Image (cartoon, helix red, strand yellow):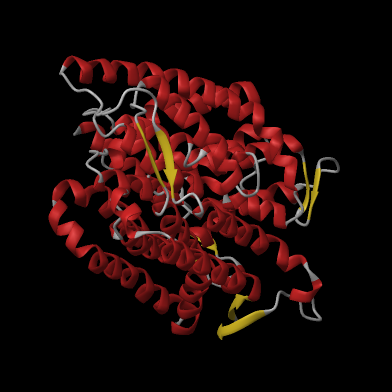
Amino acid sequence: MKKLKVLLCALCSAFFLFPVNVQAAESTQAASVPVWLCIPFAGLLLCIALMPLVKGEWWETHQPHVVVLWILAMAIPFSIVYGIGETAKTVLECTVNDYITFIILLFGLFCVSGNITMEGDFAGSPRVNVGLLALGTFLASCIGTTGASMLMVRPVLKMNSWRKRKAHIMIFFIFMVSNMGGILTPIGDPPLLMGFMRGVPFFWSLHMLPVLLFNMAVLLFVFYHVDRRMYRKDIAEGRKPDISKPGTQFRIDGLHNLIFLVMIVAAVILSGVLPGLKIFQDSAGNVLSIPIFKGVSLGIPSVIEIVIILAAAGLSFKTTPKEIRTRNHFTWGPIKEVAVLFIGIFITMQPALMLLRQVGPDLGLDQSYQLFWATGVLSSFLDNTPTYLVFLTTAGTIGFTSGIATSLGTVPVHLLSAISCGAVFMGANTYIGNAPNFMVKSISDENGVFMPSFFGYMLWSLGFLIPLFLLDTLIFFL
């Protein structure tokens, strides 16, 4: 309980230790942003963290109502400070250009991966689990952390379904597959895609391979010994895997859905490439878009991305027998929970992002280790994409003359590496740090895995990830 109180105090302090007033960014530059506008965001995070522990059944039923209350708690004071029109614009901007594409991508991957099932007599032993985590980690750079997570989570759960002690497996799954594996390509994680759209070469991210291999070696070594200890306890209690036939039996059903998975990955790549083509720009060089309200618009490339993803999800359901989803224990519960919680997170975090955009360039961060930790810590609680862009812009405006030439300025390789690793790696610090984290938790909970609470998970990340990131700092970022 003392540890929980300390964590609560630390989280609250993070929001109140900002300067009392700072200048807001972009369209609200003339007005100051009161720090208390961040309270609804902190309140929603505390609800996500504590309500499942305090009133679990009530929370499951009333999540949408709580989210709406916190959105109103942010929107009403915001309207008083900036006006109803500016509030509507802010809410619509993040909903249309961030949340919709975010949730549709998750929805598409959730649907397609739910129509692929792996069957076999591979038991969830420490060696098998190490192999699955390593495979998923490398796969994440090919199809994205969300795609790899949704594709691998059910096979991992199935192979370990006979075990009693398995929450640690899914925790390390989130560490590696849902986060760190996305560091090698712009497909892997949205922040890197944003960097690619601003001039960072597509294959530049391969420079982070040594960091990834080091982190994989450390985490897989630790995981193997933790899993072996838990495995032996399960065996000692008489638990055995259900292997009905001798020999190694393995098959994949619904394999044609890989085509639809490729469609989704292609849609994500197109969303980053099409805005740079003249055919998708007007005479002033702005991306063609559909106007919605007061300067808020949905870009045509985003519309194309959405259409392709929804088409892939629809075709996946149409061409896959229902029996495969039944064997996968497929339900709509996890995607519904993520959709509800993250609309609240996306809207209530806008004042915090406004503060970050304004103060970021004035923080005096010009060293690799500083940018690694600044980007990482904020990416643990805020959307890592805008956080990445803030510090990429900061590095680009320092005035370096050698490094990677981007549309935001020249950024030295060591600073770009630090920003990229901070945004991608430290999303693993909390359940809300990266999109697939909470999805993996929800699917695991639904399949009978007793995942730790919000703060319980943070204790795991403090115990295993923070020491690793300190090693990363000493070896790669000093």
Query: Is residue 465 something that shows in the picture?
Result: yes
Above/below status of 387 relative to 339: above
Q: Quadrant of residue 149?
A: top left
Position of 154 with respect to 98 (left or right) is left
Q: Position of residue 432 (x, y in %)?
A: 40, 49
Foreground of the two, 312 or 203: 312
Find residue 400 and report its horizontal and vertical position in percent: 81, 43
Most foreground residue, 190 or 375:
190
Q: Quadrant of residue 39?
A: bottom left
- Where is residue 122? Give x, y as percent: 37, 28
| Quarter of the rendering containing residue 334 | bottom left
**Residue drawn at the location 52% of the way across and 64% of the way down:** 312
Residue drawn at the location 46% of the way across and 18% of the way down: 221
Q: Quadrant of the N terminus?
A: top left
Work out whether residue 123 or residue 88 is closer to the camera in this orientation and state it: 123
Seen from this angle, which residue lies furthest right? 401
Please identify the quadrant where the C terminus is shown.
top right
Q: Residue at x 28, y 36 (%)?
A: 456
Q: Position of residue 28 (x, y in %)?
A: 56, 72
